[in-house]
Image (cartoon, grey):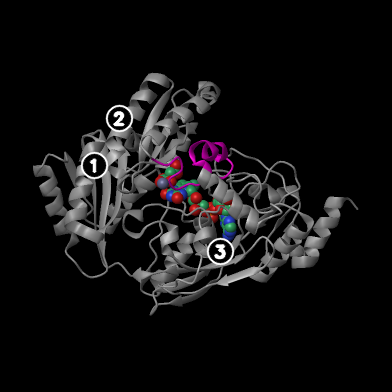
Amino acid sequence: MSDSEARRAELRGLIGADGVLTEAHDTAPYLVDERRLYRGSALAVVLPRDVEQVARIVGWCNQHRVGVVPQGGNTGYCGGATPDESGLQLLLSLRRLNRIRAVDAGNFSITAEAGCVLASVQRAADAAERFFPLSLGSEGSCQIGGNLATNAGGLNVVRYGMARELLLGIEAVLPDGEILNGLKSLRKDNTGYDLKSLLVGSEGTLGVITAATLKLWPKMRSSATAFVAIATPAHAVGLLGLLKAAAGERLSSFELLPRIAIELTTRHIGGVSDPLTVAFPWYILCELTASADEPLSELLQQILADAAERSLILDAALATSERARSAFWRLRETVPEAQRHAGSSLKHDISVPVASLPEFIDEASLWVRSHVTDGVLVCYGHAGDGNLHFNINCIDQERSAAFLAQEPRIRRAIHDLVAKFAGSISAEHGIGRLKRAELQRYASPVALAAMRSIKGALDPNGIMNPGKLL
Ligand code: FAD
Ligand code: MLT
Ligand code: ZN
């Protein structure tokens, strides 16, 4: 028996034969990332059923110095959930840890296992007359463990914050195979270092998240959604100020879209149509929500009338039905899919302070226009959080290879500009394998040294997701 075969047999002994996949046709879907940037190989794909099985596997990996790559829904954009090509690492899928353990409506909290698909957590909250606000275009397949491991952002951050801010307690398996049982549901708990927060955004490099207790809100009873035309991103910042001042915490989404996003989605996604009759350069999709019955449409109309008087907006369509609201959101959420249909693209998930968005967009767009003649800019995103998906699509698919070959110089120019604006080179998608060198370049040496110390202290054998993040 080869070394690999002997190890696979040991793994079967730990969690049962049905939890260990080794045949190529079974393992293949786990070994390629969402963007098809990386293809890996693995000793095996393991599918534990509970936290004890995860602990057994990680303990075994630590003992045998086998690298372990946690994987949730495999929707991440930075190759963090794909093993390397050596065939020596273990892919640990959380998909079978998919139970909602408890919904505590009185405490406004829910405890879900890491492998619960995000949409199922939202549904469980809804069934208890509660609301779980994390919302991403990938919510039908990404998992809550992956959301926490990447500190996901998405469409409601302007009101509720990122995944980290939704977390009350965590259960995780640490690199030595010990179970950290921190599933508290407390709003206040100042008892030393915040270990749960350390695991959030650690992208599988400090341990395996197996369950989480998350905050819930009262179920939303009213909403008002508008698709607003504006002339420039500077007008978006002005409109955001008005909305925040007049609607306060009711403002839950504020998304920026360029004209080309409408063109791409109407061309490539069935059933999507332009909400307005005339073409405009930029758009804002904004939404107000409330847990009580409130006249939010009237409020939004008043704010938009005020914005029109101040020449901040050019036109607007208000959703008059749930169907119209869904249509606005479908347009927004399918921009990445439409971009994919349009061919190869380069993605830059960046953030700058909200007030700097217009200047950043001006400077960065000018650079793209003058230096990337075979690309078209598709710059959209969570403008309410200062987060842009500053993406560039290849114009001529026949020359896609030449377009993609420019990636290093384009990335450098855009990220240098982000640094000039004191921004972030990864606002919400993480570092993974894709942006490791970028982290080394843009993070402060002091921060990097502290991160390495933490990694070394918790994972001295370097078994957790080797080759990712640091
Ligand atoms: P995976 O891709 O499986 O893993 C991501 C990372 O987390 C890897 O490093 C992996 O090792 C680690 N990991 C996964 N599970 C665990 C665990 N249980 N314990 C420890 N580590 C773990 N992201 C946003 O932030 N905002 C968006 O608006 C957004 N929109 C998207 C839209 C589309 C159409 C798509 C395809 C993706 C989008 N994403 C977005 C990116 C992606 O969905 C998120 O990063 C998501 O949080 C990843 O979750 P996942 O379960 O798929 O994780
Ligand atoms: C989004 O906000 O749609 C995603 O984070 C960006 C993307 O999928 O490229
Ligand atoms: Zn996004």
Neighbour tally class for label 3: few under 14, some 14-19, many 20 plus, Cα within 10 Å: many
Is label 1's Cβ within 8 Å of ligand 2?
A: no
Neighbour tally class for label 1: few under 14, some 14-19, many 20 plus, Cα within 10 Å: many
Residue for point 25% across, 33% down: 281
Identify the secondary structure beneath mark 3.
Answer: loop
- Left or right? Give the position of 427 relative to 223: right
Identify the secondary structure beneath mark 1.
Answer: helix
Residue for point 31% across, 46% down: 255
Q: Nearer the viewer, mark 3 or mark 2?
A: 2
Q: Which of marks 3 and 2 is nearer the N terminus?
A: 3
Q: Can residue 418 be seen in this view?
A: yes
Residue for point 41% across, 59% down: 134
- Residue 114: numbered disc: 3
- Give me the C-alpha separation between circle 1 and circle 3: 37 Å
Viewer-proximal residue among 394 and 178: 178
Q: Which of marks 1 and 2 is nearer the N terminus?
A: 1
Residue that badge 1 annotates = 236
